[in-house]
């Protein structure tokens, strides 16, 4: 099984499906390159819009890599085809999770980060479905492997999830508890989760439940922020929070 990528699109092949990722957009650091973060867009969006947003942030030492998800049928949209990091049905704690799609996207992210210089700290973040995929990558990092058992080799240093949820939250604690190394990695990884209390697309309770699941599984280095009156979108004070948190956790200059 192999996972490859190029900036103009790539295929991640699994036993049953091949996923063709779209164009990747890169925002170069304006100052000294100290960190690289892959940022994942929401359902139906693309890497270009992520890049435009991130370019305006006061984080001159971060290189942003903004990939575009494959176009696929999405169950929650009645099978309508659009960009999606995995197939998503109705949000539910008991709903099925598309592990094959999640693994392919997590591997694509890891490939994007694998060629960064050794002295550059790497992380992943995203909005909505992108946040869900970022949080899934955090669990792969802690366990040292993807859901399909293939080793996960990227040393994540920060994960950000805005208006998202955690796929596989029901079984996470059991998977982490059985391994001393998984518990150690989980405890070392800084996480920032933010969610609007008025979110009507990914209801707040899913963000809160995800934070609780991560915490109980051993992700102790976690910050969860709620925003009164905010729906399923980002606002300047939330992005300011992200900037301050990343600067502090990654030890960025300026």
Image (tube, rainbow, N blue to C red):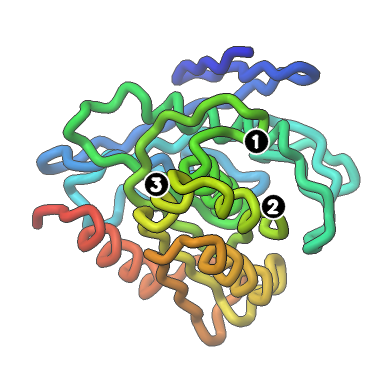
Q: Residue at 49%, 61% (x, y): give it.
A: 218
Q: In the image, residue 107 lies at what x, y percent? A: 54, 28
In the depicted structure, whether residue 113 falls above or below residue 49? above
Q: Is residue 41 visible?
A: no
The mark found on residue 168 in the picture is: 2
Residue 197, image quadrant:
bottom right
Give the crowd class for mark 2: few <14, some 14-19, many >=20 residues within 10 Å. many
Mark 1 or 3: the one toward you: 1
Residue 31 visible at all: yes
For the point 62% across and 19% down, the residue is: 12
Front-lying residue, 18 or 234? 18
Question: Nearer the N terminus, badge 2 or badge 1?
Answer: 1
The kind of secondary structure element at disc 2 is loop
Quadrant in the rendering for residue 221: bottom left
Instruction: Spot the residue most to the bottom.
Output: 228
Find the distance from the CA under tag 2 to the CA under tag 1: 10 Å
Residue 71 position within the rendered picture, expressed as x and y whole percent measured from the top left: 70, 31
Q: Is residue 106 left or right of residue 247?
A: right
Can you identify the residue that label 1 sits on?
147
Q: Are marks 2 and 1 in contact (CB under 8 Å)?
A: yes
**Mark with earlier residue (1, 3):** 3
Mark 1: secondary structure = loop
């Amino acid at each position: 099984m192999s996972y490859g990528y190029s900036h103009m699109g790539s295929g991640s092949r699994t036993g049953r499906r091949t996923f063709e990722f779209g164009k990747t957009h890169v925002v170069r650091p304006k100052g000294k390159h100290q960190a690289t973060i892959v940022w994942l867009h929401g359902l139906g969006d693309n890497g270009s819009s992520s890049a435009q947003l991130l370019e305006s942030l006061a984080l001159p030492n971060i290189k942003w890599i903004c990939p575009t998800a494959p176009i696929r049928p999405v169950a929650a949209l009645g099978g309508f085809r659009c960009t999606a990091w995995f197939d998503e049905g109705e949000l539910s704690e008991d709903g099925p999770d598309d592990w094959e799609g999640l693994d392919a996207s997590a591997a694509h992210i890891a490939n994007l980060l694998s060629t960064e210089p050794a002295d550059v700290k790497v992380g992943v973040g995203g909005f909505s479905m992108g946040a869900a995929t970022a949080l899934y990558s955090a669990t792969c990092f802690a366990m040292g492997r993807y859901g399909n058992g293939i080793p996960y080799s990227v040393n994540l240093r920060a994960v950000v999830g805005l208006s998202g949820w955690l796929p596989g939250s029901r079984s996470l604690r059991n998977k982490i508890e059985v391994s001393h190394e998984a518990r150690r990695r989980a405890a070392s990884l800084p996480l920032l989760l933010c969610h609007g209390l008025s979110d009507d697309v990914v209801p707040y309770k899913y963000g809160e439940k995800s934070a609780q699941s991560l915490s109980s599984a051993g992700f102790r280095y976690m910050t969860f922020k709620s925003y009164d009156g905010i729906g399923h979108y980002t606002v300047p004070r939330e992005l300011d929070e992200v900037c301050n948190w990343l600067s502090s956790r990654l030890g960025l200059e300026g």
